[in-house]
Amino acid sequence: MEYRGYDSAGVAIVSEDTINCVRAKGKVALLKEKCLTETLTGAVGIGHTRWATHGEPSEKNAHPHKDCTGDIFVAHNGIIENFQKLKDQLVKKGHRFVSETDTEVVAHLIEEYAKKEKDFAKTVRLALKDFHGAFGIVVLSKKNPGTLVAARFGSPLILGIGKEENVVASDATAILPITNSVIYLNDGDMVTLSGGSYEISNFKNGGEKLHRTTTTIEWTNGAAELGGFPHFMLKEIMEQPQALRDTMRGRLVPSEGTVKFGGLEAFENRIRSLDHITLVGMGTARFTCLVGEYALEELAGIPAKVELGSEFAYRSSAVNEKSALIAVSQSGETADTLNAIREAKRRGALTLGIVNVIGSSIAREVDAGIYNHVGPEVAVASTKASTSQALLQIMFALYLGRMRGRSKSDGQVLIKEMQKLPAHVERILKSADKIKALAKKYKKCENFFSLGRKYNVASAFEGALKLKECSYIHVEGINATELKHGPISLIDKNLPTIVVAPKDSVYEKNKSSIQEIKARKGPVIAITTEGNKELEKVADAVLYIPKTLEMLTPILAFIPMQLLAYYLAVERGTDVDKPRNLAKSVTVE
Ligand code: F6R
């Protein structure tokens, strides 16, 4: 689970008549060192990497947490919203809490129920019914040394069925080294693992037994390994030509100038008659929606707007059965985006997903969806998933556009250009050394601006996010036209600006922005179209992307930004794949 970002970690292992627990603040490597000095043997255990929500990152707050007696150990992903109330009640009953976490209440509540109910699984079930919030939970009991109980509500949990061992985890990549045969548990599911067997039941419904189908994960274990690259981020940047091919595979229909999506077929009539689309996502995923927004309007003539997943429920916007909500999410577990889906359903809208992780919560909650098929993205900073997300939104816009009157020949022109994207990206990747040299030159700068217009507002914002999260440099993404409405007062020789200025319909306007910056002695790194030499005369550095249709330029412009972010991070010695304070899946609101 390391790749998802964490600040402390711990394990607890049952060994005959005792449970040994080791925890450490910081990296798993530290935990590993500590484990070497302990006797940790046994066939049943739990482990956790924590990303602090309640209480600072510390050994005391690291999971697993235990009850007063040390009989019960739990690890938990998510948030127990009513933990304070439960904690107050338990403290009154004499329970002693040692951490500041919401999770510890789980162990004590199970302990409380165990005073009356002797069956381990039943005590867990009774406790689970009292929690509000989101959780994926695993529980060990000293009195039941061969058993592990796990449950999910709102946070992901997957059961892996191996040859000689079974495993539960909140992420498929953690299971792949053991097995690719999995069961995606549903909200309300509880699984009891013991003696090589498992039993799934519903913890909300009196423990009713459930049958869930087994699925085979297609991703190979190797896909989540470095394969000779120094970092996953670089590996995933370099994988983009293939990722884009995989995104398009089997979906382009050049003869008809359109695109087909197997997952949407059953909803085709409803999609054709939509009168409005809202695109939601968070972070990078939302920035890719800025590409989708323009593309939907241009290709399908449909009003589209982008919203933060987190804000959707708080707006009284006119969303109804004639609307669709498209949720964009790599992990498929982002709580803010999931909330938007639930709200859109409440208002009668069609919910569609663009998701990378198969079987994830978003993939299962939307009415229909499209998978990215780019394989696991391990680095916290999204790269290959983001270019695929932007491309899929353009493909969807074409699919809808063709149903609503766009001509076949228009579609064919766009498809032809889409097919060239992987080769274009390969060309950009060859300029990695040039970008590395730029990173060396600018590594001491603490502030940057990142500008773009129209389709490349997305590139400016996404580039800014990538640089800041990886290199810890403050970068502000700005719509280029806004520069003169305020931010320009900050421009001087110490504030470099990246300007995404391909030869498109707003090129001349972007050129004026570059002139305005240069007139105030601001350094400029321009990203423009191959063959356009004129920016070399004004900008301090020029990076090139191959010529393509205006709509597709962000997919190419993202790449030099990703490389710049990567090399700046390496130059500045940050933790590239797991930047501080970040988590790969943000399963809390
Ligand atoms: C930035 C990044 C995040 C995610 C965001 C949404 O590089 O990765 O901003 O894009 O947290 O995550 P998903 O796509 O999993 O919903």
Image (cartoon, helix red, strand yellow):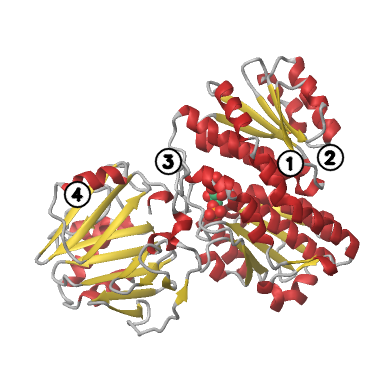
The picture places residue 247, in percent across and down from the top left corner, at: 65, 60
Q: Amino acid at mark 4?
A: Cys
Q: Which mark is residue 63?
A: none
**Dot placed on the residue nearer the N-terminal end, 1 or 4:** 4
**Dot placed on the residue nearer the N-terminal end, 3 or 4:** 4
Please tell me whether mark 1 or mark 4 is closer to you in this view.
Answer: 4
Please tell me how crowded label 4 is: few (under 14), some (14-19), or many (20+) other residues with Cα within 10 Å.
Answer: some
The image quadrant that residue 398 belongs to is bottom right
User: Circle 3 sits in a helix, a strand or a loop, which is it?
Assistant: loop
The CA distance from mark 1 to mark 4 is 49 Å
**Residue holding disc 3:** 581
**Residue holding disc 1:** 456
> Do callouts 1 and 2 mark residues in contact (Cβ within 8 Å)?
yes
The CA distance from mark 2 to mark 3 is 38 Å
**Dot placed on the residue nearer the N-terminal end, 1 or 2:** 1
Please tell me whether mark 1 or mark 2 is closer to you in this view.
Answer: 2
Q: Amino acid at mark 2?
A: Asp
Instruction: Specify the quadrant that holds the N terminus.
Output: bottom left
The picture places residue 249, in percent across and down from the top left corner, at: 68, 64
Please tell me whether mark 3 or mark 4 is closer to you in this view.
Answer: 4
382 vs 8, nearest the viewer:
382
The image quadrant that residue 274 belongs to is bottom right
**Dot placed on the residue nearer the N-terminal end, 1 or 3:** 1
Q: Residue at x 53, y 42 (%)?
A: 234
Q: Amino acid at mark 1?
A: Asn
Q: Is residue 587 visible?
A: no
**Residue holding disc 4:** 35
Left-right relation of 487 to 212: right
Please tell me how crowded label 2 is: few (under 14), some (14-19), or many (20+) other residues with Cα within 10 Å.
Answer: some
Q: Which mark is residue 504?
A: 2
The CA distance from mark 1 to mark 2 is 10 Å
Please tell me whether mark 2 or mark 3 is closer to you in this view.
Answer: 2
